[in-house]
Structures are given as structure tokens and as C-alpha cells.
Image (tube, rainbow, N blue to C red):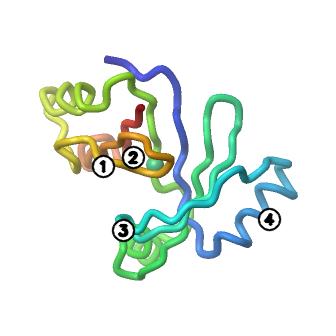
Amino acid sequence: MKPSHIEHIGIAVLNLEEAIKYYEKVLGLECYAIEEVKDQKVKTAFFKVGDTKIELLESTDPEGPIGKFIEKKGPGIHHLAFAMADVAQALTEAESNGVQLIDKQPRKGAEGLSIGFLHPKFTHGVLTEFCGE
Ligand code: ZN
């Protein structure tokens, strides 16, 4: 199975409000949704750029995944999400190709989408997400 497009790029930010201003004022994009994902201890903001979205991620807890990422690497690009018609199937295929999965089964992410992550050690350093309906 191959991705149809890049669904979104996840970007870890220190301050969601400040980052939204940058994307709106400098790039002229419009924030169309702000959503807290309690599971992931993040607040997210979304912008559309063609078929691809920008997903800004602000940590709500220093112990959460984004909090830890920023502490280690600072703010910046956090993950790349590929649109997959069938996330469960795409995860199974990646695993059968020797990629370690963070999520063995799809789970619910922002916007009610089905998501699953691959381990960056097996994807040349890029935290990779599969994302679908
Ligand atoms: Zn994502």
C-alpha cells in the first residue's frame, strides 16, 4: 500500500498562540481548528496548504510526548503523516517489512482520524505516522 499524499506535517511549538500568529500573518494561512488531544497531552492547531495540513502541537504536560520532544530537541518538525486508505493494513505491511511499530493497532487521533506511528529508528530518523478515515 502506498500513501495518496502527505496528510499533515506535525510541528512541535512552545506557544500555540504565537505560532498561529506566524502562520496566519506571515504565511497567510487560516487556522481552521484548535483541538486538545488529552490522550497525547497536546493542544493542536490546523492549517490547510493544498491537500496537506500543518498540525501545530503545543504540549500541555512536560511529561507528554511533545513536552519530552521539545526538551530534547527544541521546537521544530516533529513528524510526517502519510494518508493511507487503510491504516491497519499499512501498519501490518510496514511491520512485515521489518519496521518496528509504535502503534500495533490504529488509534483515534485529532480530527477523529485513525492513526498509527512507526518508530523513527526504523524510518531514517523521521517519526512517521499513517493517517486515514
Ligand atoms: Zn500527526
Pick the residue in front: 109 or 116: 109
Tell me which numbered mark, 1 or 2, is placed earlier along the sequence: 1
Image location of residue 124, percent across then percent down? 33, 42
Q: Residue at x 40, y 36 (%)?
A: 131
- Using the image, determine if residue 6 lies above or below residue 38: above
Tell me which numbered mark, 1 or 3, is placed earlier along the sequence: 3
Pick the residue in front: 87 or 119: 87
Gap in angstroms between the C-alphas marked 1 and 3: 14 Å
Tell me which numbered mark, 4 or 3, is placed earlier along the sequence: 4
**Mark 1 surroundings: few (<14), some (14-19) or many (≥20) residues within 10 A:** some
Gap in angstroms between the C-alphas marked 4 and 2: 27 Å
Q: Quadrant of the C terminus?
A: top left
Q: Report how many numbered discs are placed on residues in the image.
A: 4
Say if disc 1 is inside 8 Å of ligand 1.
no
**Residue that sits furthest to the front in the current view:** 112
**Residue that sits furthest to the bottom in the current view:** 62
Which residue corresponds to mark 4?
21
Q: At label 4, which amino acid type do we have?
A: Lys
Which residue corresponds to mark 2?
126
Image location of residue 48, percent across then percent down? 69, 40
- Disc 1 + disc 2, Cβ < 8 Å: yes
Q: Residue at x 24, y 31 (%)?
A: 88
Which residue corresponds to mark 3?
65
- Using the image, determine if residue 2 lies above or below residue 12: above
Which residue corresponds to mark 1?
120
Gap in angstroms between the C-alphas marked 4 and 1: 30 Å
